[in-house]
Amino acid sequence: MKSHAASAIPYVDGKTGVRVDPLRRASIEASSKGLPWNALVAEIVAHSNWESNDVTVGGHYLAMNIGAVPLRFEAKGPHGFQHVLMPPGSIWLNPEGRPFTHRVTGAMEFGAIVLPATHVNRLLGRHVELRPRCGFEDEVLRCLCRAVLLEMRDGGKKGPPFADALALAISVHLATHHATRQVGVAAESGHVSPERFTRVFEYVEEHLGGILDLEKLASVAGLSASHFGREFKRIVGQTPLAYMMGRRLERARSAIRGSADDCGCGVPTRVCRPTAPYAPVQATLRRHARDLPSARSRSASGSIQRVTQVPFKTPTGARHRLHG
């Protein structure tokens, strides 16, 4: 169905970083905007006499000439504007974040597909840099793009798994045929250097008080979730979940120590109440609390009463007691 609604393609002004819509006057003949697709965005667009200035896209951008005649336009390059010819079925590839300026005169019809770079990297298990290309012929890529556009036009009847499979196939093909260096899908058993996890550790520290999940950490590292989990344990010596719990415990311990030192008193008993099934965490907090200088001095003088028994319920409902 034709529409002049806002484009679903994440166009961004290359200078200001503000979201823009260079297709606001175009006719959107079909769009994935209302489909439950997470791996890609797609549209079929009909337009004429338009111009884009320093526009970037939030993902690897594929545009295929689906018209019956060659598409002619001007593209700005390092040495000014150059004339470009795209035969029917040819493809333009623009990597994520690369700005482009185009001048189009006359009518045009194209299919656009966007794959977020983080998603591509996670699917392939490594960071992939693509090289920009315009008007090139690639029969396999053309068939994959057509399959996406046809599924979108059909209302996504085959479901999200089909779209995800097409996104994976396109990602693998781009990585093996259109990357800055020829790469294949990373072997799941391949080792990753420890330096690659530096950004992961920084991200954990920045978001320690919020929600952290394996998928997000894997995307920061540019790895698949399964590969990331194995490599993290190999390098760090513990699972990502255990590492995050340890960092949160350390931060809580520092906060408790600071509060106790500031007020010159022991640790409040409510801080040591366990929340099943994390009784070992409670026990560790109590052990560190006893090591506080203020706690030892007051305990010796008899002015502080140690909590010797704290009841709690396990997830199965059984009652236990921790003896200090």
Image (tube, rainbow, N blue to C red):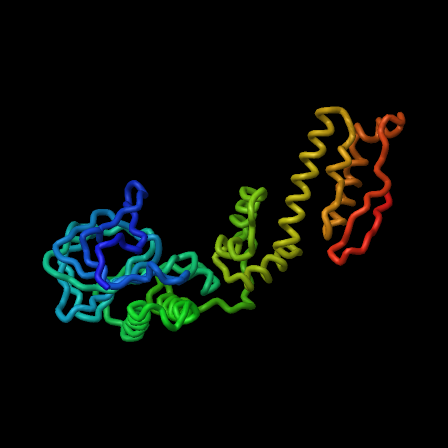
Q: Nearer the viewer, residue 52 or 190?
A: 52
Q: Residue at x 32, y 57 (%)?
A: 95
Q: Is residue 184 visible?
A: no
Residue located farthest toward the left when viewing the structure as drawn: 106
Q: Quadrant of residue 293?
A: top right
Is 112 located above or below residue 22 in the figure?
below
Q: Residue at x 66, y 56 (%)?
A: 237
Residue 88 coordinates in the image, percent (x, y):
18, 70
Q: Is residue 49 visible?
A: yes
Q: Nearer the viewer, residue 278 or 285?
A: 278
Residue 169 coordinates in the image, percent (x, y):
39, 71
Left or right: residue 316 compared with residue 211: right
Q: Report the quarter where the N terminus lies.
A: bottom left
Q: Report the quarter where the C terminus lies.
A: top right
Left or right: residue 315 compared with residue 14: right
Count of labels shown?
0
Is 2 located above or below residue 144 in the figure?
above
Q: Residue at x 15, y 60 (%)?
A: 84
Left or right: residue 237 compared with residue 52: right
Q: Nearer the viewer, residue 32 or 116?
A: 32
Is 134 located above or below residue 274 in the figure?
below
Residue 144 coordinates in the image, percent (x, y):
32, 72
Q: Residue at x 26, y 52 (%)?
A: 6
Left or right: residue 89 compared with residue 196: left
Residue 235 coordinates in the image, percent (x, y):
61, 56
Q: Quadrant of residue 40?
A: bottom left
